[in-house]
Image: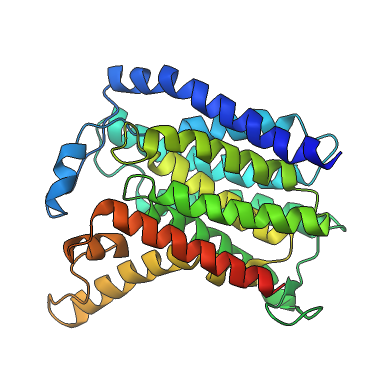
Amino acid sequence: MTGSYIVVPILISFALSAVLGPLVIPLLRRLKVGQTVRNDGPGTHLKKSGTPTMGGILIMISVAVTSVLYTKTHPKITPVLFLTIGFGMIGFLDDYIKVVLRRSMGLRPWQKMFLQIVVTGIFARYLIHIPSVSLSLKIPFMQGQYLDLGRLSIPFMFLVVIGTANGANFTDGLDGLASSVTIMIATFFTVIAVGTGAGIAPVTCAVTGALLGFLLFNVHPASVFMGDTGSLALGGFVAASAYMMQMPLFLPIVGFIYMAEVLSVIIQVVYFKISGGKRIFKMAPLHHHFELCGWKETKVVAVFSILTAMLCLIALAGM
């Protein structure tokens, strides 16, 4: 029955996330796993200092437990779950070093990149050796047309997966922002998965449910942040789902906010260096720029979420 792998995973994952919240958040608070706020950021963020982070644990546990119930009947869930948990564990390690061991840098950039390459490499190896998964890419708005990159398929996959994961990471900077944006994307992938019989609907539903439960505690004013643990896991999920359905070329549409957040940082850094200290944005990532322009935090979250929802509808038309 369709409902058994659509509605049920959402309900199970939501219930797990909602129940675990009151148990895990006080534990994180006792462990003093608190968020550190940048002094050069919006003044309204100073009150967030000390709010428990690493709440992405709630999302990962809820998604993993729910998805495992469906792996026998839906084996294509496994690589999506692997990339989700794999990137989530990298984020967990980074968070643990920063907030528990009190080392401000966390993982060094080269260490984080190395681990991301390793996890992506294992995912790529799986896709190469599974005949039922094709590396040809559906072209938006060109029904039945595919792009075959040949030998460039694997390098392109590394670029897409790592770029998407870090895009989600940069998006996690306001209460409920990464959660709300990714709920829209997960819902989009659920619709496509069900409509095409892609075999990954239970995990896309599980992520949707987990995020809805997490938002109970992450909506403004947030009582917990997901940290790199959650944001990298979500980025891994989005990239993996896209590849399992041959849809990486749709990511610039549905994941536009991810892309804009990353590009704002890159543009800011490059322009700062070549201009001798000048800035294009008041602050990067992009959501902070809008805050410093006078937008309330809740408005930024609402606008970015609505924009993502509209772009998901456009991408659906592009199928």
Quadrant assignment for the N terminus: top right
Is residue 149 something one can see in this rendering? yes
Percent x, y of residue 229 = 44, 39
Of residue 43 and residue 154, the one placed in the foreground of this image is 43
Q: Residue at the spot x=73%, y=54% of the render?
A: 125
Examine the image and state in which quarter residue 60 appears: top right
Q: In this view, does 274 lie to the left or right of 309?
A: left
Q: Residue at the spot x=69%, y=35% of the render?
A: 9
Examine the image and state in which quarter residue 246 appears: bottom right
Q: In this view, does 284 lie to the left or right of 302?
A: left
Examine the image and state in which quarter residue 36 appears: top left
Quadrant assignment for the C terminus: bottom right
Percent x, y of residue 286 = 30, 65
Percent x, y of residue 302 = 38, 56
Of residue 87 and residue 29, the one placed in the foreground of this image is 29
Q: Residue at the spot x=36%, y=55% of the render?
A: 301
Is residue 118 something one can see in this rendering? no
Q: In this view, does 289 lie above or below 181?
A: below
Q: Residue at the spot x=75%, y=29% of the render?
A: 69
